[in-house]
Image (spheres, rainbow, N blue to C red):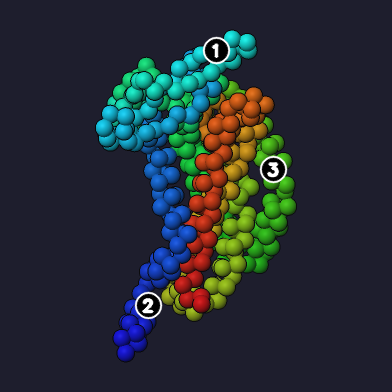
């Protein structure tokens, strides 16, 4: 009787629940999607305030730290009893007498403590105010910590990966927002009015979908002047990605509008004299907004990969702008592959971000129809 009562209670609760509640209950049952949600929130938290999570200034060059290897952070010290607290050992730089190659060895005689919420270099928070508080800061500024090693100019790779998250993750959101605007407006007009308008819109969509995406990206990105400021390059990359990414969403929206425009609630709204704009945005769009959210979530990783590919090929964002694609350009030579494999770590960040967003999108897509068994 208890199991029957619980089942009946759940059925009663589902009968009076809103659509968003049903979606959330279905989404919570998707374990991978829930884990991806937390990873995505963590990534975008880092992207909002990258300076807080960075250890060193991402643009600071250090001639004595060229291709500095990654360093370990120790949590426990048992050399003199038992001490708890993060610390690291600095590296000593020596030269091979025959090849003059740089050799870094750990100096275990000098322990450098790390401080939580310590002070370091100054950074801007969303352009609103400045701060020098960092999640993890070294107590010895003359012996910096390189968690992910350093590049050919002695710049901290970890801090640059953290800083690059702001550009690489936000460019996906901005590009998808532009694609969403074009896709919903043009697809909605095509599906709602039908007829000749629908025919013309569909031929335009067919033309856009038939274009080879990568050559179009390369051609448009190569046409950008190299002397433009970083902000202008950033905006134009967003425009380029959105111009080729709206057609698929427009086709989905058009199909939903075609199926909804004959529904009774739409006909009743027309008979009541409701303006067409209100019918579209207050009655029809909300009925499948969950599907749009799922489609947008799946489109964000595609935008991130597109920006990374363009920047990696030297046709997207340019230094001194820091993005994951720009950082991966540092690993385009044999020396990096042979002596500094840690320069590929920005690629690991791309893989984690794309996988988390794809799994999150899959979970939202499955939960978008909570009535589906």
Q: Where is residue 95 in the image (x, y as percent from the top left)?
A: 55, 12
Q: Residue at x 56, y 31 (%)?
A: 343
Q: Where is residue 325 in the image (x, y as percent from the top left)?
A: 57, 35
Q: On the picture, is 4 further left or further right than 336?
A: left
Q: Residue at x 63, y 54 (%)?
A: 247
Q: Residue under label 3, please give it.
A: 214
Q: Which of marks 1 and 3 is nearer the N terminus?
A: 1
Q: Residue under label 1, please give it.
A: 95
- Closer to the camera: disc 1 or disc 2? 1
Q: Residue at x 63, y 47 (%)?
A: 244
Image quadrant in which you'd find residue 283: bottom left
> Element at badge 1?
strand
Q: Residue under label 2, please give it.
A: 14
Instruction: Decide: few, some or many residues near mark 3? Use Cα within 10 Å; few <14, some 14-19, many ≥20.
Output: few
Q: Where is residue 29 in the image (x, y as percent from the top left)?
A: 43, 67
> Element at badge 3?
helix
Q: How far apart are marks 1 and 2 (CA)?
A: 70 Å
């Amino acid at each position: 009787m208890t199991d029957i009562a619980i089942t009946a209670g759940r059925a009663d609760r589902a009968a009076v629940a809103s659509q968003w509640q049903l979606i959330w209950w279905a989404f919570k049952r998707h374990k991978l999607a829930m884990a991806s949600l937390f990873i995505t929130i963590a990534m975008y938290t880092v992207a909002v305030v990258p300076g807080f999570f960075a250890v060193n200034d991402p643009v600071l060059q250090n001639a004595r730290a060229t291709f500095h290897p990654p360093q370990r952070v120790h949590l426990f010290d048992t050399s003199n009893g038992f001490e708890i607290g993060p610390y690291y050992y600095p590296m000593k730089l020596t030269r091979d007498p025959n090849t003059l190659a740089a050799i870094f060895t750990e100096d275990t005689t000098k322990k450098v403590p790390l401080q939580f919420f310590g002070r370091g270099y100054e950074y801007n928070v969303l352009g609103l105010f400045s701060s020098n508080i960092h999640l993890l800061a070294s107590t010895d500024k003359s012996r910096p910590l390189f968690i992910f090693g350093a590049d050919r100019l002695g710049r901290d790779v970890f801090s640059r990966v953290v800083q690059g998250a702001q550009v690489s993750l936000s460019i996906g959101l901005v590009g998808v927002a532009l694609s969403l605007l074009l896709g919903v407006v043009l697809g909605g007009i095509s599906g709602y009015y039908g007829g000749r308008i629908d025919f013309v819109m569909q031929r335009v969509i067919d033309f856009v979908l038939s274009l080879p995406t990568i050559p179009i990206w390369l051609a448009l990105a190569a046409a950008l002047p190299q002397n433009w400021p970083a902000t202008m390059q950033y905006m134009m990359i967003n425009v380029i990605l959105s111009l080729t990414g709206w057609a698929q969403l427009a086709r989905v929206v058009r199909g939903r509008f075609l199926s909804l425009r004959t529904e009774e609630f739409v006909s009743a709204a027309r008979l009541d004299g409701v303006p067409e704009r209100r019918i579209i945005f207050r009655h029809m769009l909300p009925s499948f907004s969950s599907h749009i959210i799922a489609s947008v979530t799946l489109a964000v990783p595609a935008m991130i990969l597109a920006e990374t590919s363009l920047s990696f090929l030297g046709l997207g964002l340019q230094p001194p702008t820091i993005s994951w694609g720009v950082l991966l350009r540092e690993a385009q030579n044999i020396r990096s592959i042979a002596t500094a494999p840690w320069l590929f770590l920005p690629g690991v960040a791309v893989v984690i971000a794309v996988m988390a967003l794809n799994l999150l999108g899959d979970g939202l897509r499955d939960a978008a129809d909570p009535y589906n068994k």
